Image (cartoon, helix red, strand yellow):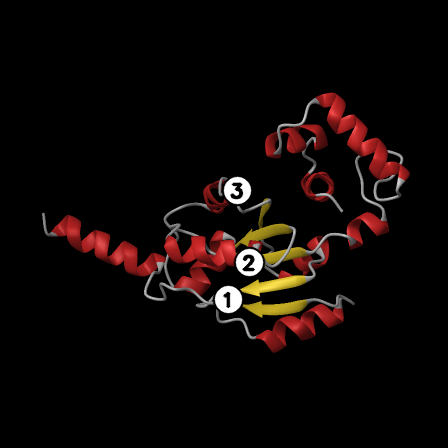
Amino acid sequence: MESIDKLILSAMYVCQIDGRSVSEEIKKKSMLSDDMIKSKIDELVKNQFVNEDRTTLTEIGRSSLRVVLAGGVFDIIHPGHIHTLNAARALGDVLVVVVATDNTAVKMKKRNPIHSQEQRQELVNSLSMVDLCLIGQEDDIFKTVNMVKPEIVALGYDQVHQEKFIIEGCKKINLDAKVARLQSPIPESSSHKIEKEYGESIHGI
């Protein structure tokens, strides 16, 4: 399959989840003209990758994509995050990132986040390797997993989630997803450490 076909299918997948305009999403990620987009979608409909509505994927179309799901707080974006998300993106065709809610962030970090969940979502959505960023569910992380239906769940080097917990949770929703533990070349990078050092430098002035 051509890379441009994968790009169009990926755009449709993202738009099915969050309601974005398919044509605008394709234009944002490519230099294709309206006529070229129409022609490519015609071809994908003909080959049964896209439904007759020209905006949603068939089962064949969806199965042709490898979706990767990653999650975290992402309060201060640092080099460790960038490396981890690039590594996650390299595992598949689409990268969906889930940011923790403010309440979940407090439970995880034992402090209030600097940025609200909406601000953190906007920050992560602005990263080039991220196709879609969602705000997570407080009561059940597998609600979001079930909506995204990833082939791979990518865990960062500093995440406490256990692979077994993720695998068993996926099995309960009849999802056969693999878990990938990603490594960071900068393990000392963390939002908390950056915030602490920044605060100390300000007080030292």
Q: CA distance from mark 3 to mark 1?
A: 20 Å
Q: Who comes first in sequence, dot 3 or dot 1?
A: 3
- Residue 157 marker: none
Q: Tell which tag, 2 or 3, sits nearer the viewer.
A: 2
Q: CA distance from mark 2 to mark 3?
A: 15 Å
Judging by the rendered image, the residue that carries numbered circle 3 is: 125
Q: CA distance from mark 1 to mark 2?
A: 7 Å
Please identify the quarter of the rendering in which residue 137 is found. Answer: bottom right
Q: Amino acid at mark 2?
A: Ala
Q: Tell which tag, 3 or 1, sits nearer the viewer.
A: 1
Label 1 Cα neighbours within 10 Å, binned few <14 / some 14-19 / many ≥20: some
Please tell me whether residue 182 is drawn above or below residue 122 in the rendered image: below
Judging by the rendered image, the residue that carries numbered circle 2 is: 88
Please identify the quarter of the rendering in which residue 111 is found. Answer: bottom left
Q: Residue at left 49%, top 71%?
A: 160
Label 2 Cα neighbours within 10 Å, binned few <14 / some 14-19 / many ≥20: many
Q: Residue at left 44%, top 45%?
A: 116
Q: Is residue 125 left or right of residue 106?
A: right
| Image marks 1 and 2: residues in contact by CB distance under 8 Å | yes
Label 3 Cα neighbours within 10 Å, binned few <14 / some 14-19 / many ≥20: some
Q: Residue at left 74%, top 40%?
A: 5
Q: Residue at left 57%, top 54%?
A: 89
